[in-house]
């Protein structure tokens, strides 16, 4: 099977994990501190706060910005459910902006039209590894005095105008098992704001500054040294793995040009897309439907995935929540109907990439 994602751990990972096992220090310890320091460099910020997953990382970032009940946060309607859950868990109200169909990221002009007195932040999602259009959002944040929380769960090492994901606002990353850096479960908040970092360090550890010295209500969001050991071993490869993903995407796009009803992904000018997913659109002009294409690929042992089959609010549990404010988002609806992700991970061989191209041409040409 040619897989969408695959985790391979090197000897250093094994050595570091073994070191943790033998140290007896399994919970948050020196390796978490090291992972944070190295990750901060990749995100181009001074502070990185490791947490237990990318969902609580987003939620705690919202809380750290002082956002809660009555406040509004604008998110894209086309994203993973965690983006929405995180804002709701923090108690705030959600507004949905549409996406641009070419990049699958939030439409900055639509965001501008949703801003009002209650708006406290915008949460662009760097979907599939491509950064959202950050320049107009940064300008909006400044003129309207609202915060930016970047959902960078899929975008470790991505850039916009040479500036990394996680450095444009408060960044939030995930290290879930399929991500470009994967520790099983894990998350990271990135920021240059020392007060915010201090809040997050206390909040993740029961609000405790020194042993049994509680300064605020908190929670337990700590990462373990076992996870950090795996993360550290992978960070050393992030740049070359991302380059390989980019090269794989280039090969796929070259091979898939000119097929009726198949739209290949676009990289934003001046951006560095890290292809967490290589996502095409299968339009009604295609010879077979999206599901048909996916089924045929499956028969040829090629995995494909639909991320995501619906807009994020389109479930009864959200539609019935008064804090979920639904807008017209036609591009998001279309994307949910048409997207299909194909394997592009760093371990694919040239021959596997050729098999993917040949299989798709065989089905759609
Ligand atoms: C866009 C997006 N946001 C948030 C998350 C949440 O991360 P986690 O699964 O680590 O909680 C994920 C990943 O699963 C994601 O893809």
Image (cartoon, helix red, strand yellow):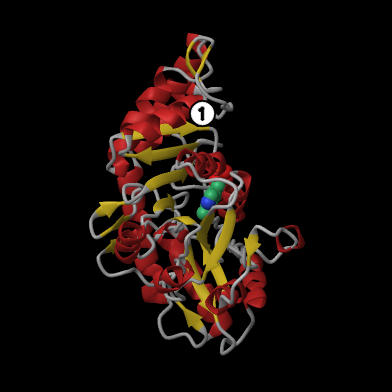
Q: Nearer the viewer, residue 258 or 199?
A: 199
Q: Position of residue 159 (x, y in %)?
A: 30, 55
Query: Can residue 41 be seen from the camera position used here?
Result: yes
Question: Could you tell me residue 125's position as x and y percent?
Answer: 46, 58
Badge 1, how many Cα within 10 Å: few under 14, some, many 20+? many
Q: Position of residue 146 (x, y in %)?
A: 40, 55
Residue 228 sits in quarter: top left
Q: In which quarter of the view is residue 317 placed?
A: bottom right
Residue 327 place in picture, x, y as percent: 59, 73
Residue bearing mark 1: 203
Residue 346 seen in the current view? no
Please state which of residues 127 and 71 is positioned toward the viewer in this rendering. Answer: 71
Q: How many marks?
A: 1
Label 1 within 8 A of ligand 1 by Cβ: no
**Considering the numbered disc 1 on the image, is that residue within a helix, a strand or a loop?**
helix
Q: Residue at x 48, y 40 (%)?
A: 8
């Amino acid at each position: 099977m040619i897989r969408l994602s695959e985790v391979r751990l090197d000897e250093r990972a094994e050595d570091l994990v073994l070191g943790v096992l033998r140290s007896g220090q399994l919970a948050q310890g020196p390796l978490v501190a090291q992972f944070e320091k190295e990750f901060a460099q990749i995100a181009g910020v001074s502070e990185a706060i490791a947490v237990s997953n990318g969902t609580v990382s987003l939620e705690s970032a919202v809380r750290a910005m002082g956002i809660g009940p009555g406040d509004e946060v604008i998110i894209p309607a086309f994203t993973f459910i965690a983006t929405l859950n995180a804002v709701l868990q923090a108690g705030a109200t959600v507004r949905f902006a549409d996406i641009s169909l070419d990049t699958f990221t939030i439409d900055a002009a639509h965001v501008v039209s949703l801003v009002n007195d209650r708006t406290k932040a915008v949460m662009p999602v760097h979907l599939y590894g491509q950064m959202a259009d950050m320049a107009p959002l940064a300008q909006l944040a400044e003129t309207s005095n609202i915060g930016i929380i970047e959902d960078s769960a899929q975008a470790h090492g991505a850039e916009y105008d040479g500036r990394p994901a996680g450095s444009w606002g408060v960044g939030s990353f995930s290290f879930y098992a399929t991500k470009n850096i994967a520790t099983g479960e894990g998350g990271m908040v990135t920021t240059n704001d020392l007060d915010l970092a201090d809040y997050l360090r206390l909040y993740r550890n029961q609000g405790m500054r020194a042993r049994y010295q509680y300064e605020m209500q908190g929670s337990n969001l700590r990462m373990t040294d076992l996870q950090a050991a795996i993360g550290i071993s992978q960070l050393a490869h992030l740049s070359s793995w991302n380059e390989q993903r980019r090269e794989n995407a280039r090969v796929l796009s070259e091979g898939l040009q000119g097929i009726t009803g198949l739209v290949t992904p676009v990289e934003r000018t001046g951006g560095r897309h890290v292809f967490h997913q290589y996502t095409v659109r299968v339009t009604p002009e295609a010879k077979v439907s999206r599901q048909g294409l996916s089924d045929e690929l499956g028969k040829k042992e090629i995995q494909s995935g639909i991320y995501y089959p619906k807009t994020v609010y389109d479930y009864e549990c959200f539609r019935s929540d008064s804090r979920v404010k639904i807008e017209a988002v036609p591009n998001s609806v279309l994307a949910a109907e048409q997207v299909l992700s194909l394997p592009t991970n760093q371990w694919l061989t040239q021959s596997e990439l050729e098999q993917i191209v040949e299989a798709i041409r065989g089905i759609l040409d």
